[in-house]
Structures are given as structure tokens and as C-alpha cells.
């Protein structure tokens, strides 16, 4: 008996003496920490174990103690952008995280148009290979993972952005980060968390969908597939929840095609998702997103209605939308290949709205109001202060209708930042639509060369029947 008791005591002593500090994957060498912020470090170790931490930028000693759940957490203060630095953690073992940069950290999320990379055909990235060693960009790519409960870790790892690591990282995310790096002259950390085909429900906490009668009912329309999850919360739990302790500057988002059949609830869904992410991070961070591109869907009107729902989310605080209809050259390809300009437009939003740099071209005009005067419809827009122009002799995808709801191609006059729209057959105008179709591409721009966002002034029923 004494022999077994002694063995047990020795086992406990050994386990305690050699307990190891463990860190989540998001905390690692090569990472970028958000500058000038209170940032969390956290992990696991033996309950009651003292953790000593030294950050090389100030050489201060900070201590934490693991709680009864084997968890520890501590706040550190990061300096202004710079590096490389290291962080040393000492407990039952010693961990040194090296080659750490301090800068700006952004999450890049959504479905396939955010996921698409060099390896998936965005060959323009090859032109960047020779320049990557000049940029302080780091990448954290999260593998596709699901869970029915929120997780506290994932299997990603930080890497230096080079000609190998960039090949499987979001092209939109990279181009976004590249322009921030150039214009801000600070290191950029990009966290890729995306999955082609996923509806927005899977990126939203399950309880928020289940507790909302409308969203819960809509979610039942997401039919199971062999390629991506459709159940609410499944991607959020595994690919977003493990990140929420990690300080970020904001999020860019490119998604929507998989919610085209349920556009009527998409605005509420996205606002719910964004609100949940901000609550989890405890920060009202900026959320900049891409309006889906023109594409020949199999049902009438579904693309137009989804874009309309996306535009309505602009009323949410600290959001911004980029319009990319002019970047599309093939409306039979749901993955437009020009990701460079998409990333640039997202970056310009961030540079102006988040970082306060003065750039003229960063927002597309969005319909504001309609006034009828005699036989003309006069339209005003937000974000059109630079003035509007027509590229070409005649407007494309611009239509006007009277009370009979019959739309005719419109005649257009531009007066500063107003559109004056008419048609001789419409004696008493009631409604105007612009680029309000699945695959239509218009030709009205700002003088700064940003395309006008699609819109309609009416709320009439839209045909969503299958194409014949």
C-alpha cells in the first residue's frame, strides 16, 4: 500500500513540476499584434501555476496565475507600430515567441470570392512575388473546420507573407493588406477565415438565429451539401470564436451568393452577425464588405434583391460597401478574377474611414431620394459630391416606369450629382431602376471613377421565377 501511495505522490509531483504552458495557435512567432492597444495573452497550464511574461519592447515583467480551470490570461500594452520583437513566457516550461511585429490586424472572411487565391486561379498574385520581401505582411490562414459549440483554439499558424504562403491565402485579403501596408507604412496582420459556398447563417452564433423566428425559419432553406456547412453557428464556433480574444482593427467580408434565395431576411441576418462579432470582441470595429457581382443566376431577380439587401446594411454604424460591377468581364463566372481592384477599394474605405487619410475615391454613390417634376424623375445620391458622369453615349440598365409598372429604357441628363431621368412614353413617372437585374452592368460613375450602386426607387414585387 505504501508503495502505491509513494508512486502516486511521485506522479503528482512530477506532473506538477513539468506542467507546460500551452498557447492557442493565434499566439505564435511571426504574429502581428494590434498597435497601441491593450492586448490579451492567454493559454493553459497547471492550476495555480505562476506565469511570468516579458515583452522585449519594454522589458517589463508581468505575472499571471492559472485558475482552477487550467486557464490563464493577462493584458499587455503594445507600443506603436514596429518590430521585430519577442515575448518570453516562463512557467513549468519556457516559450519564446519571436519575430513579432506590431501593426494593424484585420480579419478577412466570407465565402469563395474571399477565399479565392493564386492556387484557385487568381494568377495576378504572381506579379507580387518579387515585391513581397519589401512588405511587412503576416498571414494566419484558418483551415476549414466546424463545431456545434464555440471552440477556444484552431489549427492555423502565423507565417511571413512570401511567394509560397501567399499562394493559398485570400487574394482580396492580400491586396487589401498590401495597400494598407503601403499607405500606412506599418506591419499588417491578415487573418483568413473563409469557406466557399457558406451561407451567412453558419458565421452567426446559433442561439441568435434560433431565438429569432424569422431567421430560424429562413435558415431551414439552407439545404445540406457535401462541400460546406449550412447549420447556424458551425463556422462561427470553429473559425471565429477562437479569435475573439485577439485584438483586431476590423473585418472585411465578401459573401452573399449563397443567401440569394432568402434576400428578404439577409439585411437582418448580416446585422445580427456583425453585432454578435462586435459583442464577442467587445469592440465596435469597422465592417467593410463587397456587394456581390453581376452573374447570370438560374432565377430571375435574386441577385438584384441580394444586392439591395446588402446596400440596406449601410445604415449600420461603422460599415462600408464597395461596388464592383464594373470589374466584371464575364457574367457566367461567379468568381470575377479581378481581385486586385476589389482589395484596393476595400483598402480605400479603411484608409479614409478608419485611419483618416484623405483620399477622394472611396465610396460609390448610393440612391438617396426621388423627386418628380413634370415628366422627369430627379434622383439624388449619397456619396456623389464629386459629380456624376456617364461612360458612353447612352445609359445602360437605366429604366423608368409610371403607375402601370411597365419599365422603359430611360433618357438621362446629369446635373452635377443629380440624375434627371425620363422617357417620352412615361407621361407621369413613378419609379426608376438602375442595374436592378442579376447580370446587368451599368455605366454611371463618379468623376473619381467609382460605379454607382444598383438601386430601385419602388417596392413592387420582383419576379424570382426560374429562367426558361
Image (tube, rainbow, N blue to C red):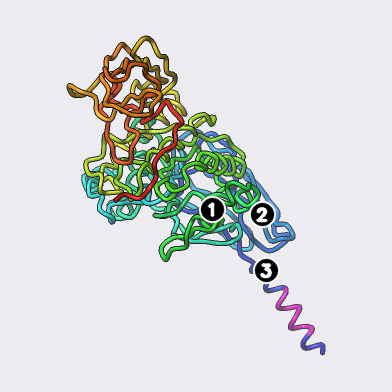
Residue 236 visible? The answer is yes
Magenta residue span: 5-12
- Packing grade of label 3 (10 A; few <14, some 14-19, many >=20) is some
**For the N terminus, which image quadrant?**
bottom right
Question: Mark 3–mark 2 contact, CB under 8 Å?
Answer: no
Closest to the observer, 189 or 306 = 306
Say the numbered circle drawn on residue 17: 3
Q: Nearer the viewer, mark 3 or mark 2?
A: 2
Task: Report the magenta stretch's main SS.
Answer: helix
Place of residue 187 in the rendered image (x, y in percent of width and height, measured from the top left): 41, 39
Q: Nearer the viewer, residue 294 or 401?
A: 401
Check if residue 8 falls in the magenta segment. Answer: yes
Q: Secondary structure at mark 1?
A: helix
Q: Residue at x 28, y 30 (%)?
A: 397
Q: Is 273 on the left or on the right of 304, as rendered?
A: right
Judged from the image, the secondary structure of the residue bearing numbered disc 2 is strand
Magenta residue check for 382:
no
Give me the residue at 62% from left, 40% from top: 282
Would you place residue 111 above or below residue 183 in this image? below
Badge 3 or badge 2: first in the primary sequence: 3
Residue occupied by mark 2: 72
Please state the horizontal and vertical placement of residue 103, each as a whole percent of the image. 45, 38
**Which residue is under mark 1?**
219
Amino acid at each position: 500500500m505504501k508503495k502505491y501511495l509513494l508512486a502516486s505522490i511521485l506522479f503528482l509531483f512530477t506532473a506538477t513540476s513539468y506542467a507546460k504552458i500551452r498557447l492557442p495557435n493565434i499566439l505564435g512567432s511571426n504574429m502581428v499584434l494590434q498597435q497601441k492597444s491593450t492586448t490579451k495573452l492567454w493559454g493553459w497550464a497547471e492550476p495555480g501555476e505562476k506565469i511570468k511574461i516579458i515583452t522585449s519592447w519594454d522589458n517589463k515583467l508581468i505575472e499571471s496565475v492559472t485558475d482552477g480551470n487550467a486557464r490563464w490570461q493577462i493584458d499587455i500594452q503594445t507600443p506603436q507600430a514596429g518590430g521585430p520583437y519577442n515575448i518570453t513566457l516562463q512557467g513549468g516550461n519556457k516559450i519564446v515567441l519571436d519575430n513579432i511585429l506590431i501593426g494593424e490586424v484585420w480579419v478577412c472572411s466570407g465565402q469563395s470570392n474571399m477565399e479565392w487565391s493564386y492556387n484557385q486561379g487568381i494568377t495576378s498574385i504572381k506579379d507580387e512575388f518579387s515585391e513581397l520581401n519589401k512588405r511587412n505582411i503576416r498571414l494566419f490562414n484558418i483551415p476549414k473546420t466546424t463545431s456545434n459549440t464555440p471552440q477556444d483554439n484552431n489549427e492555423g499558424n502565423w507565417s511571413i507573407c512570401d511567394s509560397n504562403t501567399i499562394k493559398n491565402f485570400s487574394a482580396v485579403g492580400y491586396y487589401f493588406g498590401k495597400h494598407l501596408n503601403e499607405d500606412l507604412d506599418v506591419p499588417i496582420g491578415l487573418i483568413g477565415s473563409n469557406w466557399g459556398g457558406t451561407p451567412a447563417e453558419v458565421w452567426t452564433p446559433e442561439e441568435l438565429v434560433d431565438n429569432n423566428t424569422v431567421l430560424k425559419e429562413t435558415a431551414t432553406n439552407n439545404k445540406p451539401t457535401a462541400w460546406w456547412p449550412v447549420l447556424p453557428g458551425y463556422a462561427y464556433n470553429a473559425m471565429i470564436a477562437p479569435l475573439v480574444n485577439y485584438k483586431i482593427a476590423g473585418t472585411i467580408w465578401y459573401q452573399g451568393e449563397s443567401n440569394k434565395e432568402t434576400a428578404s431576411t439577409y439585411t437582418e441576418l448580416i446585422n445580427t452577425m456583425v453585432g454578435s462579432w462586435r459583442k464577442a470582441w467587445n469592440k465596435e470595429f469597422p465592417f467593410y464588405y463587397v456587394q456581390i457581382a453581376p452573374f447570370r443566376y438560374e432565377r430571375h431577380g435574386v441577385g438584384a434583391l441580394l444586392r439591395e439587401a446588402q446596400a440596406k446594411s449601410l445604415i449600420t454604424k461603422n460599415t462600408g460597401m464597395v461596388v464592383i460591377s464594373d470589374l466584371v468581364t464575364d457574367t457566367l463566372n461567379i468568381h470575377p478574377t479581378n481581385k486586385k481592384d476589389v482589395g484596393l477599394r476595400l483598402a480605400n474605405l479603411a484608409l479614409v474611414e478608419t485611419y483618416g487619410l484623405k483620399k477622394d475615391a472611396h465610396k460609390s454613390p448610393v440612391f438617396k431620394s426621388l423627386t418628380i417634376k413634370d415628366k422627369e424623375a430627379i434622383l439624388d445620391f449619397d456619396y456623389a459630391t464629386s459629380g456624376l458622369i456617364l461612360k458612353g453615349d447612352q445609359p445602360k440598365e437605366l429604366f423608368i416606369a409610371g403607375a402601370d409598372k411597365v419599365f422603359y429604357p430611360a433618357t438621362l441628363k446629369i446635373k452635377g450629382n443629380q440624375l434627371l431621368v425620363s422617357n417620352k412614353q412615361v407621361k407621369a413617372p413613378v419609379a426608376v431602376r438602375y442595374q436592378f437585374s442579376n447580370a446587368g452592368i451599368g455605366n454611371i460613375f463618379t468623376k473619381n471613377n467609382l460605379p454607382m450602386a444598383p438601386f430601385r426607387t419602388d417596392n413592387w414585387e420582383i419576379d424570382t421565377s426560374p429562367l426558361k
